[in-house]
Image (spheres, rainbow, N blue to C red):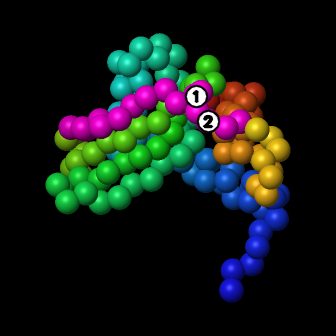
Amino acid sequence: MTRQQNVQQQNSLTIEGILRAAKLFQQSDRHVAWLGTALRAKGEANASGLLVAVRTIPDQGGGDWVQGTWLTRGRRFWEFEAVVLRRDGESVDIERLEDVTDSVQVSCHVPGIGKSFGHLALEVLDRQLEIGHGSN
């Protein structure tokens, strides 16, 4: 039987997930290394920020399907979906890359979960910027 987590524990787990995603980008993981360039190409001049969510699933076509959320220093949320071929140096097929800021909940008081994912992501971004670790 799974133990019910309190609001603090849920928020802590969400923050841990955000930090894991951010670390993947900071380490230039091949699944997300292309993202900064793609955001700039979409007109997001200041594409620096944090990868706050990422998920990968093996794709039958010899790559990996990658889905995630990027949060810019300008506090804009971008969602993406792409197929990244498994061999380094191969192309990326971007299926979706869009600004979803207006649809992201950023409440600090969501019944049953406390702070929303968007609110926690903004908190992590602010902390990273304070200590000078925002990604470029």
In this rendered view, identify the residue nearer to me: 106 or 30: 106
| Magenta extent | 91-106
Which residue is more in the foreground, 136 or 101? 101
The answer for how far apart the CA atoms under marks 2 and 1 are is 5 Å
Q: Residue 25 placed where, x, y %?
A: 48, 40
Q: Position of residue 96 (x, y in %)?
A: 35, 35
Q: Quadrant of residue 130?
A: top right
* The quadrant where residue 8 appears: bottom right
Report the residue marked by disc 1. Answer: 101
Q: Secondary structure at mark 1?
A: helix
Q: Are marks 2 and 1 in contact (CB under 8 Å)?
A: yes
Which residue is rendered at x = 19% and y = 41% of the image?
Answer: 90
Query: Horizontal placement of 90 versus 8: left or right?
Result: left
Residue sticking out furthest to the left: 61
Residue 108 at least partly seen: yes
Q: Going by the image, does 19 lie left or right of 33?
A: right
Mark 1 Cα shell of 10 Å, populated few (<14), some (14-19), many (≥20): some
Instruction: Give percent across and percent down for residue 41.
Output: 35, 18
**Structural crowding at the residue carrying mark 2, measured as other residues with C-alpha within 10 Å and reported as few (<14), some (14–19) or many (≥20):** some
Q: Amino acid at mark 1?
A: Thr
Viewer-side residue, 131 vs 52? 52
Looking at the rendered structure, the kind of residue marked 2 is Val
Residue 1 in the image, given as x and y percentages of width and height: 68, 86
- Residue for badge 2: 104
Element type at mark 2: loop
**Horizontal placement of 14 versus 99: left or right?**
right
**Residue drawn at the location 78% of the way across and 62% of the way down:** 9
Viewer can see residue 124? no
Tell me what residue is drawn at x 47 percent, y 44 percent: 68
**Circle on res. 86:** none
Q: Is residue 100 one of those drawn in magenta?
A: yes
